[in-house]
Image (cartoon, coloured by chain):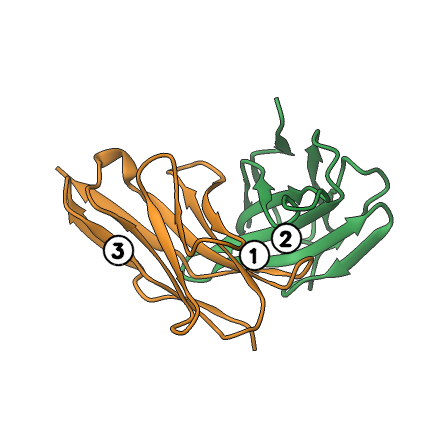
Amino acid sequence: EAQVTQNPRYLITVTGKKLTVTCSQNMNHEYMSWYRQDPGLGLRQIYYSMNVEVTDKGDVPEGYKVSRKEKRNFPLILESPSPNQTSLYFCASSSPVAGEQETQYFGPGTRLLVL
Amino acid sequence: AQSVTQLDSQVPVFEEAPVELRCNYSSSVSVYLFWYVQYPNQGLQLLLKYLSGSTLVESINGFEAEFNKSQTSFHLRKPSVHISDTAEYFCAVLYNQGGKLIFGQGTELSVKP
C-alpha cells in the first residue's frame, strides 16, 4: 500500500530534550516536506527537500533541522524543543512524474506536546 | 506576497442542506489549486484539484469546486451534505510547478442532524 508513515504519532517531552520525528514514504517520491498545523493558522511549511541531500527552509524553519540521506526518509529534528513547538506535524511527499508532481500525499500526523 | 484566504473559520449546516466553503488566493499567472479534507484525528486527504482544463472539478463524494481566474477564487460546494462530511477543509495553492504549497487557515464544517 502506497503511504507516508510518521513515528511517533504522539509525543510528550520536556523543554530542551532533543527529539526526532521520522517520516518514510514507499512511493519513490523525490519531493518531501514537513508542515506544522496550528489552530487558525492552517498548515505552514517548515522544511522541504527536492531530492537526496537537497533541503531548504520553508516558512517557519527556526528551531528545526532536517536531513535527507535516503530518498524514502526525511526525519525532522528538534535539537532543543520549546513549548511554542507544541503542535501537530505532518510529513508529505509528491511524485516527480509529470502531471502528478503537484499533488502532495500526507502522513497521519504527529502530535507533539512540549512541557 | 502569496497568500490563501478561507473566509469562514467555521460553517455549521444541517444535514441535506447545501454548503459552500470559500477560498480566495492572491493573484498569479500560474496556479494549481487543491482542496484537502481532514477528518477528526486523521491526516489530510486530497479531495479534489485543479491543474488545467475544465474549470469545474469534482470529487467522488459529491463535492465540486470551480476555478474562477477573474475573481481568484476556488470555492468548494456540495448540494446536499451528510453527517459524515463533518471535517476540516483546507484550500491550498501551488504557485508555479515545483513551488511551495500554501495553505489557507482551514474551515471547520459541522453537519448537524
x, y percentage for residue A27?
70, 31
Q: Which residue is mark 3?
A: B20
Q: Which residue is mark 2?
A: A15
Chain at numbered mark 1: A
Identify the element where label 1 is drawn: helix
Label 3 neighbourhood size at 10 Å, few (<14), some (14-19), many (20+)? some
Disc 1 from disc 3: Cα separation: 36 Å
Could you say which chain is coloured green in the image?
A
Residue type at mark 1 is Pro
Residue beneath the point at 22% across and 51% down? B19
Could you say which chain is coloured orange in the image?
B
Residue type at mark 3 is Glu
Label 1 neighbourhood size at 10 Å, few (<14), some (14-19), many (20+)? some
Residue nearer the viewer, A81 or B85: B85
Q: Is residue A111 left or right of residue B84?
A: right
Q: Which label number is shown at residue A83?
A: 1
Identify the element where label 2 is drawn: loop
x, y percentage for residue B26?
49, 74
Q: Is residue B39 above or below residue B23?
A: above
Disc 3 from disc 2: Cα separation: 42 Å
- Say whether residue A110 is visible: yes
Q: Is residue B64 left or right of residue B110?
A: right
Same-subunit check for callouts 2 and 1: yes
Residue beneath the point at 54% across and 40% down? A109
Lower sequence index among marks 2 and 1: 2
x, y percentage for residue B108?
31, 51
Q: Is residue A94 left or right of residue B69?
A: right
Same-subunit check for callouts 3 and 2: no
